[in-house]
Image: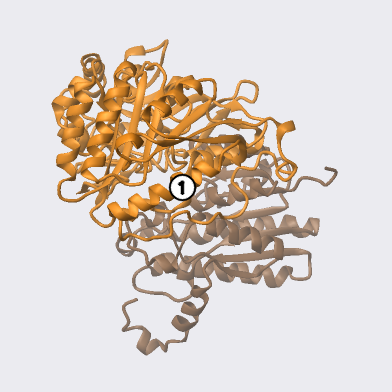
Amino acid sequence: MKLSGWGRYPALDCRLESLRKWEDASGMLRRGDTLIARGNGRSYGDAALNPDLTLSMLAMNRMQAFNAETGLLTCEAGVLLVDILETFVPRGWFPPVVPGTRFVTVGGMIAADVHGKNHHRDGTFGAHVEALTLATADGEIRECSRAQRADLFRATLGGMGLTGVILSASFRLWPIETAFVMEETLATGDLDETMSLFEASRDWPYSVAWIDCLARGAKLGRALVMRGKFMDRDALPARFAPVPLRPAPAGKLAVPIDTPSVLLNRFSVGLFNELYYRRGRTRAGPRPVHFDPFFFPLDRIEAWNRLYGRKGFVQYQCVLPRDESATGIAALLERIAAARQGSFLAVLKLFGPAGDGLMSFPMEGYTLALDFPLRKGTLALLDTLDEVTHRHGGRVYLAKDARCAPERVREGYPQYGAFETARAAAAGAPPRFASELSRRLAL
Amino acid sequence: MNEKIKTALVIGATSDIGRAIARKLADAGYALQLAARDPARLEREMRDIRVRTGVAVTGRRCDALDEDGGVSLLDMLDSLPDVAVCVVGLLGNQAESQRDSVAAERVMRTNYVGPALLMGALAERFERRGSGILVGVSSVAGERGRAENYIYGSAKAGFTAFLSGLRNRLAASGVHVVTVKPGFVRTRMTDGMALPPRLTATPEAVAVAVLTAVHRRRDVVYVRRVWRLIMLFIRAVPERVFKRLKL
């Protein structure tokens, strides 16, 4: 059946099967096809596509153990983040790292080694994974951790599913007193100011910026920087106090964008950006918000990926080392603004130091993420962005990628050699675990 | 907190529908007794429900294909449940069941003999106690035999009739019997079939329907209401026309 990632580009005919039981994993691996495990299809490009066999993990969704003393949760890889939130937020626990959507699986979060708004303080999701089980090409199910098969463990964090099929994982949840975040939004006038504000916000657990990617000249890099931290129970306003640990926000909120599919052009995006920026500027000062809109603003627009029409879109996300970021991000933004192609979903964030995943995306520096609807000239523009990223010693995020060139990825990920060695030991030669992404990038 | 915690037994708890029902019952605060054929898979569901809900969960092996229809399960339970749900079923393969009497018998016993004996044995105990709710998950396929699935359908027809008789017999006893007819459900049983979305329920929707039926003491429940209408029509077609239809 036709499958694609969240960007709906590319779409490929793939044989899709479900893994339902632990006992079936070995048999499936011994059949000889190449395969890739697929979670909830929220990587953007071609990471979870394999025409030979794409193995849906959504039926492997049992929780296995929870230690209420330590917060250690063990669950199967197909458990969705939204499930974890609904189960554990009412009990006062929250995942250490959450990406921008609740609709990802635990296996997907590990394979992409996702980051959240707290990367500068707490690293990636993988940093909090204590152990995982992996089905490898020989049909064995292997326990991996920092103490046991550490190479394979490090290759699997951010390994895009290429080292095996992640079956389960153990990671620690963190205690929270309330489900509410004190959020502060600050408008900045240019890139310098935006970056200084990130530096000044290092002690905030969560920070991220929406950036106006069409602003040019003196306004280049102007942004709304949002930062937040979970609220203590005694700080909670009276209206939230009756249910301090609500797993989902009260009531349905209005969809912030009510234009369907059409008219995504430089005028509409420019207008949106101007209005959004102005609105943000008037919203100064801290205010309590439920964690759901704070962490997952786009989840409230079901299938927002359809905004970009049938052809789909690509998301470009890169990271530049810290000392290259000021010039590099400015150069990227100039090219995007000049091409007038960016969309309204543009995000800037300061990362902390890299973790131990060999192919994990984050490194210390700034990451920029933007959506581009697929049109004539889009892919060419992205190639020029690759040039800039490369020149500044950066790299692109494989979980978002659908079009990068192989050599750019090799250059961007200096630990690729170590990854390849660990993968060969687990995935066999030629590697049993392969995706359209690994084929395209010759990984 | 003084109210006694109610207990629910789910037989066939490792099926997609059984699991969904067990989880909904746990969310509603029932302590659970789960029964299924495969102990390893049962253990997996028990752990899942414990972690998610914190309710007490026990598990027993039960195979509707055993000589006694699995009824010996009832002697192993720690206590007699307040609610018992039977989700045991097997669609089988119609063509195979036509050719192979062993395959046909497996379908018949799994969908009729085992479930009916289990519900019957539970009914005896519930009646003696003077309370309890029995829920049998049957099928719309039992309402009229069709070429496509009449071996499965005939067994479900038997089960539906059994439940209806049981309900009739126990009407004055304080014991209530619910018949659930899910229609199409997106499960392992129907994996790979092209199902019309508007007629197809999720296992969770079946579970919600079961909980509602238990709380409101409903008799016969179609998970998606449109099925009541469809089956009304299907039952009304004269046999000489029906026999030529391809449904």
- Secondary structure beneath disc 1? helix
Q: Position of residue B61 (x, y in %)?
A: 56, 41
Question: Which residue position holds label 1?
Answer: A299
In the rendered image, what is the letter of the chain coloured orange? A
Examine the rendering and report whether any part of residue B67 can be seen. no
Q: Is residue A5 depicted above or below B96 in this figure?
A: above
**What shade does chain B have?**
brown
* Label 1 environment density (alpha carbons within 10 Å; few <14, some 14–19, many ≥20): some
Q: Residue at x 39, y 47 (%)?
A: A273
Q: Residue furthest top?
A: A147
**Quadrant, the C terminus of chain A:** top left
Q: Is residue B2 depicted above or below A200 in this figure?
A: below
Q: Residue at x 45, y 32 (%)?
A: A208
- Specify the quadrant of the image occupied by residue B33: top right
Q: Residue at x 48, y 57 (%)?
A: B202
Instruction: Determine the chain carrying the residue at label 1.
Output: A
Q: Position of residue A23 (x, y in %)?
A: 38, 34
Q: Is residue A351 left or right of residue B117?
A: left
Q: Residue furthest front?
A: A218
Q: Is residue A418 depicted above or below A368 in this figure?
A: above
Examine the rendering and report whether any part of residue A381 can be seen. yes
Q: Is residue A291 depicted above or below B239 in this figure?
A: above
- Residue flagged by tag 1: what amino acid is it? Asp
Q: Residue furthest right?
A: B2
Q: Is residue A75 left or right of residue B97?
A: right
**Which is nearer the eye, A112 or A152?**
A112
- Specify the quadrant of the image occupied by residue A263: bottom left
**Which is nearer the eye, B86 or A228?**
A228
Q: Position of residue B147 (x, y in %)?
A: 34, 73
